[in-house]
Amino acid sequence: MAESAELILDGKSYSFPVTEGTEHEKAIDIAKLRDQTGYITIDSGYKNTGATKSAITFLDGEEGILRYRGYPIEQLAEQSSFLEVAYLLIYGTLPTQAELDNFSHQITKHTLVHEDVRKIFDGFPSAAHPMAILSSLICSLTAFYPESVSPDLSKEEIDLNVIRLMAKISTIAAWTYKNNMGHPLNYPRNDLDYCSNFLYMMFSFPTEKYEIDPRIVSALNKLLILHADHEQNCSTSTVRLVGSANASLYGSVSAGINALWGPLHGGANQEVLEMLQAIQKDGGDTSKFIAKAKDKNDPFRLMGFGHRVYKNFDPRAKIIKKAADDVLSALGINDPLLKIAQELEQAALTDEYFIERKLYPNVDFYSGIIYRAIGIPTEMFTVMFALGRLPGWIAQWKEMRENKEPIGRPRQVYTGELERDYVGIEQR
Ligand code: MLT
């Protein structure tokens, strides 16, 4: 007999079906709750709310498991490339060599942006945060491709938007940095692979030759893979919600970029690095900051520890910690911030206070150190996260459209004034 959940309200019993995922996660399907009972559920922050059924990413927060389309993150980070993982997330299967070649070729062909996009840069203050420019310019792509706003896009039209967005985001992202620095903007080079081309556009000058370091390319591939999807996090839920109104892929992703910019979400790795720099500036005594973190009267917060869904450890952090060690030793960098980070990590992993509260280093804790080692400035960290997260956003948007999900429209419990009569201004 199919499992169901009984709910008793005002002495009356109601039954709701239980739905089960392929990994045996169970959910009570309350789609008919309001119709049948007049009640809604309330779940601030959606901690217990499954907003959708999705076949893209599986995450088990208790066991520290993360898989894209069934493949463990550890295997993908070690053996795959960012574009291959992007294909996997978006289309559901690992590509054959021909499929991957075609996907890469299509993306490479679309890396140029319209010259009018370039002109928009002139309208931004040169000190603008790169995330502000990135989200605006990604949104502006809807103006260049207005046909992307339609309820009935064909598979070919969706694919074209996917390719365009994957291609143009790296050009726009690199340009946000160049604009910020007041450097000339570099056009993409179609003879380079995705990550090499991005590094070239970021770091090359017309005045001197830029050597692309394969160790940096490999570290970048790994970082982007680790960030590529994370099921229904804040920015992804935003992309799906905006997309559910049949907004364009560009507009939906632009909204996701804004969500990611928030310091509680993608802005966290920038905050980690700023915290490590502040500790260094203060003399580097990590025990002092550990004590501050434990003092509830002290406003200091240890950034990059704990995670909303991982209860024991963040599997991405394990991979990224090793990658940080490898990159720094391969590049011969002796970063004092890494030493501070390691001391904080050690202290937190052995201190009862942190153990009890499940405060272990998360993915943001080490990613900033690698980005710094490969020359990416702090204010670009969240842009790098967006670059990595793009295939996830696209895959989730595409799944939502293909499954013909209805427009998202949460309800509320109203707590305001009861009906009252308008009072003229002279009587107030
Ligand atoms: C993410 O990768 O999106 C972050 O870890 C945040 C989250 O999943 O809630």
Image (tube, rainbow, N blue to C red):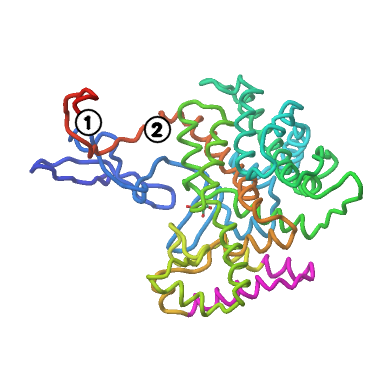
Quadrant in the picture for residue 187: top right
Secondary structure of the residue carrying tag 2 is loop
Q: Residue at the spot x=66%, y=64% of the render?
A: 369
Find residue 30 and report its horizontal and vertical position in percent. Answer: 28, 39
Choose mark 1 or mark 2, whichever is in front. Answer: 2
Which residue does the numbered mark 2 point to in the structure image? 408
Q: Quick check: 312 above or below 79?
A: below
Which numbered circle lies on residue 69?
none
Q: Quadrant of the N terminus?
A: top left
- Mark 1–mark 2 CB contact (< 8 Å): no
Q: Residue at the spot x=65%, y=57% of the render?
A: 77
Quadrant in the picture for residue 326: bottom right
Taken as a whole, is the magenta stretch helix, strand or loop?
Answer: helix
Give the extent of the magenta segment: 323-350
Which residue does the numbered mark 1 point to in the structure image? 35
Q: Residue at the spot x=38%, y=70% of the render?
A: 297
Find residue 370 and report its horizontal and vertical position in percent. Answer: 68, 62
Find residue 222 and report its horizontal and vertical position in percent. Answer: 68, 56
Secondary structure of the residue carrying tag 1 is helix
What crowding class fits label 2: few (fewer than 14 Cα within 10 Å), some (14-19), or many (20 or more)? few
Tell me the kind of residue under disc 2. Gly
In-front residue for pair 9/79: 9
Tell me the kind of residue under disc 1. Asp
In-front residue for pair 43/52: 43
In-front residue for pair 260/68: 260
